[in-house]
Amino acid sequence: MRRCKKCGAPAVIYMRQHRLGLCKAHYLEWFVEQTERTIRRYRMFRRDEKLLVAVSGGKDSLAVWDVLWRLGYQADGLYIALGIDGGIGYSAESQRLAEKFAQERGLTLHIVDIPGEYGLGIPELARRSRRGKGKPCSVCGLVKRHEMNRMAHDMGYDVLVTGHNLDDEVAVLFGNVLQWQMGYIVRQGPVLPEEPGFARKAKPLVRFYERETAAYALLRGIEYIYDECPFAQGAKSIYYKELLNRLEEERPGAKLQFYVNFLKAKEEGWFRDPREAAGPVQVVLHRCESCGQPTTAPGKCAFCRLMDQVGAQAQASRT
């Protein structure tokens, strides 16, 4: 039987990459301490700043909101109802759990209802669009990014916080390295600085394995949705996670080492945007003529072009 390194009681979790076993009380304490260390290490945000936590009803987003609440940060939640059913009432159950979490702690939860706001949920928007060849994930990502930034900016929040864990980040990094997508690689990190019209984005759980955030949620008694999104099956990110899990099984700590060394290499200047060869990149932002959010292209942003396309198809089908 594994024993807690701090008190000798039976350990509820053993982390091979740290060679560390902890009991329930000391694990919950360790998790919070490590999160705050990550916040400070990467200068994510200050205690006087207002945080908006994107919550999905899953373990990671509820765990990070819980930790920020325990640490005393000014953190409200944002739930985006995507209109996804998948035969399991996915969106309805996710929203119920997010609302339950907020109510139990007396926290503020903002809700954006995509079908209510725009007339269609993600599955139907994907079917009616040409983006991502009609696959929901591409449309879903675009809609969520637009709405998260809109809400953070319009309601005056300083930072948008997400619950991305180490497994998420390493899978993205692995995929980008396979293709040497330098534009994406140079922008990946625990913090994405704010730009005019864009809120700063931070990922406080970025150094925790997925099993560690799941353990925190279970030990804290946080009820969360266990089901994956019905459209996630077959996603490349899941395949990459499976490959990396096999590596981790053989070499405990490999994923953490891969990610931390990547961040060190970035700090040391190993990665540069190829466009910077001729000097610093000056990204010109325009205001979307429809929604007012920043966009790199003149005219309308990608989100509004998507909505125009869907609307035009709906109009054509009625005539």
Image: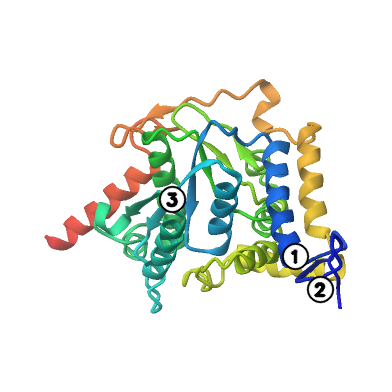
Please give left or right for residue 220 compared with residue 198 in the image.
Answer: right
Dot 3, crowdedness within 10 Å: few (<14), some or many (≥20)? some
Dot 2, crowdedness within 10 Å: few (<14), some or many (≥20)? some
- Mark 1 or 2 closer to N-term? 2
Gap between marks 3 and 1 measured at Cα: 36 Å
Mark 1 lies on a secondary structure that is helix
Give the residue displayed 32% in from the left and 64% down from the top: 124
Q: In the image, which disc is placed on residue 107? A: 3
Q: In the image, which disc is placed on residue 244? A: 1
Residue 167: image location, x then y, percent: 68, 59
Amino acid at pointer 3: Leu
Which is nearer the eye, 28 or 214? 28
Please give left or right for residue 17 compared with residue 183 in the image.
Answer: right
Amino acid at pointer 2: Pro
Front disc: 1 or 2: 2
Residue 7: image location, x then y, percent: 84, 63
Q: In the image, which disc is placed on residue 10? A: 2
Q: Are marks 3 and 1 in contact (CB under 8 Å)?
A: no
Front disc: 3 or 1: 3
Determine the image quadrant of residue 281: top right
Give the residue displayed 64% in from the left and 57% down from the top: 168
Determine the image quadrant of residue 63: bottom right
Residue 129: image location, x then y, percent: 34, 57
Amino acid at pointer 1: Leu
Q: Are marks 1 and 2 in contact (CB under 8 Å)?
A: no
